[in-house]
Amino acid sequence: MKWFRQVLAVTNMNLLSITQRFGSSLVVIIGIAGSVAVMVSLLAMASGLQSTVEGTGEADRAMILRSGSSSELSSVISIEEANVMANAPGLRQLNNEPMIAFEVYTVVDLKKKGADDTSNLPLRGVDAMSFAVRPETKIIKGRNFEPGRAEIIVGRGAYDQYEGVELGNKVTFRNAAWTVVGVFSTDGDVHESEVWADVKVAQSAFQRGASTSNAIARLESVSSFDEFAIFIENDPRLEVKVENELDFYKNQASGVSGIINSFGYLVAIIMAIGSIFAALNSMYSAVSTRLVEIGTLRAVGFRGSSILAALMMESMVLALSGGLLGAGLAYVVFNGYTVSTLAGGTFSQTSFDFAVTGEIIMQGLILALIVGFIGGFLPALNAARQNITDALRSL
Amino acid sequence: MYWVLVKAGVVRKKMRSLLTILSVVIAFFLYGLLHSADPLFSGAAGEINAERMIIMPKHDMMFGRLPQSHINYLESLEGVTNIAWLDMLSMDINSITENIPIFAISKDYFKVMDRFEASPEAKKAFFSNKRGALAGKTAADLKGWKVGDLISIPTFSKKNDGSNVWEFVIEGIYTTSPAADELGLMVRNEYVEEARIANKGTVSMILFNLDDPSKADEISNIIDDNYKNSAYATFTGNEITLSQKMLSDIGNIKLIITAIISAVFFTLLLVTANTMSQSVRERTSDLAILKSLGYRDMQIFISILLESNFIILLGALFGLILTLITIPFIDQASGGLTGGIIVFDTYQVMKGILIGVLMASLAGILPAYQAYKLKVVDALAKG
């Protein structure tokens, strides 16, 4: 108990005197804040991208692509194949119709807001069944397209990112004019970066004939997947592969967000090493200007270990404030900030929000505390071990 | 004379100088690392230049197709000298080092893309074997391929016999700059065109040279305008403009990097300014004694500035050297993916040193001014 009271007393004294060393304490705080802010922002970017892409899909849905295609873009499904698949076992039925939607997937280009050049974004040709298979789809502005007309609805992410997609506007994709009639949301997944149109109109506009790109099926239950997949993959009339929708998007997410993640850690760690040197510097000078006080404390009976603990506390408090400042800065500036990038194997834009999660903030604060610990330990040890007479003599 | 003062200032508190120098080292190390990725973002790595022209499918650069009739049209254009084309047989961005990209190249590929090189024997053997292949040096090292090896590779293209596994015989090795492009396998376009089921009569991209590079924009516009309303619209540009277009789709990475570097240097400025002002504060009486010995105010001012420059430049030097040492390891760790793309050149070094001098002067100027203004009587009275 006595030891704790000693620690508290010295810590209190140290913290109260921080204002006298305001400059060097501020350097420690800002240095650590910088590293934490950079790390938190980059990790938030990676996690935002990952949760958007991985958050797409349900376990009871299956993606069907041409075998050998790694993305919807390079996949083709003929009408004959579509007819075979519609009779597969394991499909959920809706008003006696199998819940499987055959969609056209292609890329079109639009200008991002403020960009000089156009970027690719996916256009998905869908029909009523597509909406039934993905019940999370909601029209949040305007109305749905009417079948047979050259109308498009724009995903919420694409709506925020691209120029000229206001309701009522006309946009031109490969010579055909389309009218924007609505905005849709799909609970924040990748489809919000897409543009949707009627599948029949898309087939003719993009010269697909009667063929489609891919199929999405809703199964009776998660456990019907095997039954469905075995039928599809063994039927000699079909040249396709079936993948659980969750797995499909998980595979697409790994690449880019993995790179951003490792980049974030790498930069943050290098910056943290730099901050450790700054913290060491500051703590050494904090200790050296207080040699006499420390010597006096020791002389009146304070133990070396409590001096050590108190100095460590000071350094950790500085580090923690730096960490909080940095994480807070990253949160205020970036949380919810929408950007878009190329994701997965589709080579088209996926927009996502930075997600500054609690876990990422914790990681940032842990980094700050590590810096504070290492930066404070050696100077504190030095001070605690100081010979009392030497310390007092330095007056 | 200044050297004595600077040296005395630096070694006065060795630990503090050392720690400051170390944080400068880290800052410049990070500066070097981030800037060495510059060629990647400017699209101008190695011998990539603006003289080789490429036509790509406008709407889907990666997997889109162009019909062979585009080649016939290109032949009719004046000013176009050599023409080659290539087809991607396998390309998986997420696992390039495992699944080596396979390019089916036409006869004149080496003429048009003259930054790719292979020995005359290798080229001869390659072009006389239908199933011949030239492996990029990096790919060959990675996979252990040797001349004469028969390799089977799964691709996303199906052959007449229904299988998507293709067999090739390695006839030689090709090299190029940047070395990252050596992560590939070249095979014969004639063979692929003959043996595949789908996509017959189409290519992935068309490459050509011009007799006069200054006509590049004009010719590009002619081609793109001609196919503007076609189902196979084109995007024509030189190697640099094309890689820039693809990179701009990934996002504004340059902005992120600039932001990080600014954060690093801002912190560095604070650390050094703090060290310098602390050390000047502690040295008040020493400085006063120097002045009373006859040192002029200006000399003291300069010596403090030089001290701050010394600390930062020493740190910068070690930081930049550390970068140079690290880059080969990055190349190794990436499996050759960054070969020749991550480079740190003299321009960056010079820029780094210039930034160092600027920072040091900024960080040192206030303490130096304080020392300059210092009145001997006051200082000695306090001390």
Image (cartoon, grey):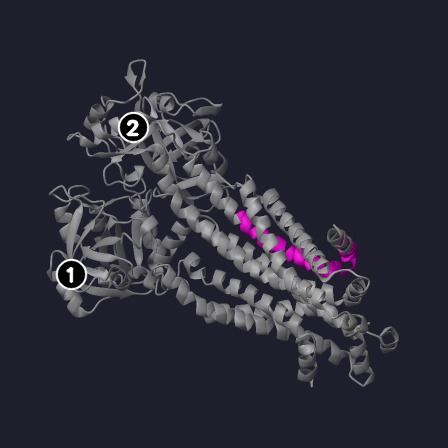
Q: Nearer the viewer, residue B298 or B378?
A: B378
Mark 2 highlights which residue? A225
* Residue that protrudes farthest toward the front in the picture: A1
Q: Quadrant of the N terminus of chain B?
A: bottom right
Return the chain for callout 1. Answer: B
| Quarter of the rendering occupied by the C terminus of chain B | bottom right
Q: Is residue A369 above or below residue B232?
A: below
Is residue B328 among what the camera can see?
A: yes
Q: Residue at x 73, y 51 (%)?
A: A4
Q: List x then y, in percent, for residue A70.
A: 29, 41
Q: In this view, does A183 lie above or below B74?
A: above
Coordinates of residue B274 in the picture (x, y in percent): 70, 65
C-alpha span from label 1 to label 2: 42 Å
Residue drawn 45% across and 60% down? B38
Quick check: B352 left or right of A304?
Answer: left
Residue A65 spot, x, y in % from top left: 27, 35
Front residue (pair B122, B105): B122
Q: Label 1 crowding class (10 Å Cα cut-off): few <14, some 14-19, many 20+?
A: some
- Residues marked 1 and 2, same chain: no
Q: What element carries label 2?
A: helix
Q: Is the magenta stretch mostly helix, strand or loop?
A: helix
For mark 2, name the chain.
Answer: A
Q: What stretch is highlighted in magenta?
A: A12-41
Tag 1 residue = B149
**A24 magenta-colored:** yes
Say which amino acid is labelled 1: Asp
Q: Is residue B341 at least partly visible in the picture?
A: no
Image quarter of residue A212: top left
**Where residue A321 sits: x, y (%)?**
67, 50
